[in-house]
Image (cartoon, helix red, strand yellow):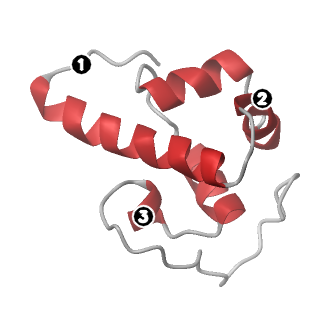
Amino acid sequence: MRIQKTDTHIDHISAYAKKIRDLREDNDMTQKQIANIIHVGQRTYSDYELGNTRIPIDTLIKLAEYFDVDMNYICALDDRKRPFPRHKSHNYSGSR
């Protein structure tokens, strides 16, 4: 789903797009590697990082679980890296 950027969305979208890019780069991973883990094409993942495409909630959960950060961090609502809550295990392919 392409996003029509408005002033109210640009800051939030760019913030969480930067978070997922930083997490990927901090872990020395390529866009293609992350795209494979979350089962999307590299172009789609690139659009996520660029803020061109809204990231589905289930994909944000997969990313948060993979990188072991909570949803508040990955959604750029909190700068504190807290671990992903492990109440339930979803066992996503590619999980660490």
- Is residue 95 left or right of 47 when viewed as pictured? right
Give whichever of 66, 55 is nearer the camera: 66
Amino acid type of the residue that numbered disc 2 sits on in the rendered structure: Lys
Disc number for residue 46: none
Q: Indicate whether 24 appears above or below 9.
A: below
Q: Earlier in the sequence, mark 2 or mark 3?
A: 2
Residue of label 2: 32
Q: Residue 32 in the image: x percent, y percent? A: 78, 29
Q: Disc 1, disc 3: CB below 8 Å? A: no
Q: Earlier in the sequence, mark 1 or mark 2?
A: 1
Q: Residue 18 in the image: x percent, y percent? A: 42, 41
Q: Earlier in the sequence, mark 1 or mark 3?
A: 1
Within 10 Å of disc 2 (Cα), the crowding (few <14, some 14-19, many 20+) is some
Q: Residue 83 in the image: x percent, y percent? A: 57, 78
Q: Quadrant of the C terminus?
A: bottom right
Q: Nearer the viewer, mark 1 or mark 2?
A: 2
Residue of label 1: 5
Amino acid type of the residue that numbered disc 3 sits on in the rendered structure: Tyr
- Is residue 89 left or right of 81 when viewed as pictured? right
Q: Disc 2, disc 3: CB below 8 Å? A: no
Residue of label 3: 73
Q: Residue at x 71, y 60 (%)?
A: 66
Q: Residue at x 34, y 67 (%)?
A: 79
Within 10 Å of disc 3 (Cα), the crowding (few <14, some 14-19, many 20+) is some
Q: Indicate whether 34 appears above or below 58.
A: above
At mark 3, the secondary structure is: helix
Mark 1 and mark 2: span between their CA atoms? Answer: 25 Å
